[in-house]
Image (cartoon, rainbow, N blue to C red):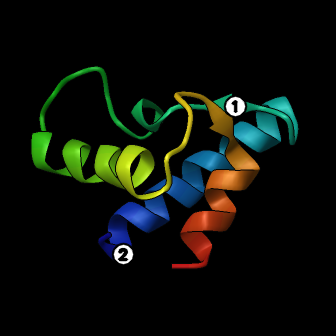
Amino acid sequence: MTQSLKEKIVDVCNKKIEQNGPNVGLSFYAFFSNKNDNPELLMETATWWILTHKLDHFEKAVKIKKLVLEL
């Protein structure tokens, strides 16, 4: 996972947690715009989320942030 993607994931998680509290859930689509303008990065993230960590569609933002920070 690229450093810029890690930073983006942590940033999005922080914003969601700040706005909605520590129990807020999100999917990997939360890190992308509604346009499929970077399919390679989307697939990298989906692979990390689904195949590597076997995460559900929605997971707690605090959990995702912790996993990314441990990379």
Q: Amino acid at mark 1?
A: Gly
Give how far across and how far down residue 38 sits, in percent.
Answer: 13, 42
User: Which of the two marks, 2 or 1, is nearer to us in this view?
Assistant: 1
Q: Which residue is mark 1?
A: 25
Identify which residue is drawn at 42% across, 41% down.
Answer: 31
| Mark 1 crowd level (few <14, some 14–19, many ≥20, 10 Å Cα) | some
Q: Is residue 26 above or below residue 51?
A: above
Residue at point 40%, 31% (across, down): 29
SS assignment at label 2: helix
Amino acid carrying label 2: it is Gln
> Between 7 and 56, which is closer to the camera in this rendering?
56
Is 61 left, or right, of 11 in this rendering?
right
The residue shown at (60%, 29%) is 58
Q: Nearer the viewer, residue 6 or 64?
A: 64
Compared to 4, does 47 lie above or below? above
Looking at the image, the residue that sits furthest to the top is 34
Q: Is residue 59 left or right of residue 46?
A: right
Classify the position of the N terminus by image quarter. Answer: bottom left
Q: Which residue is mark 2?
A: 3
Q: Position of residue 9 (x, y in %)?
A: 50, 54
As displayed, is residue 7 above or below residue 23? Answer: below
Mark 2 / mark 1, whichever is N-terminal: 2
Q: Residue at x 32, y 43 (%)?
A: 46
Place of residue 13 in the rendered image (x, y in percent of width and height, measured from the top left): 64, 48
User: Residue 69, located in which quarter of the rendered image?
Assistant: bottom right
Please, what secondary structure does the residue beneath circle 1 have? Answer: strand
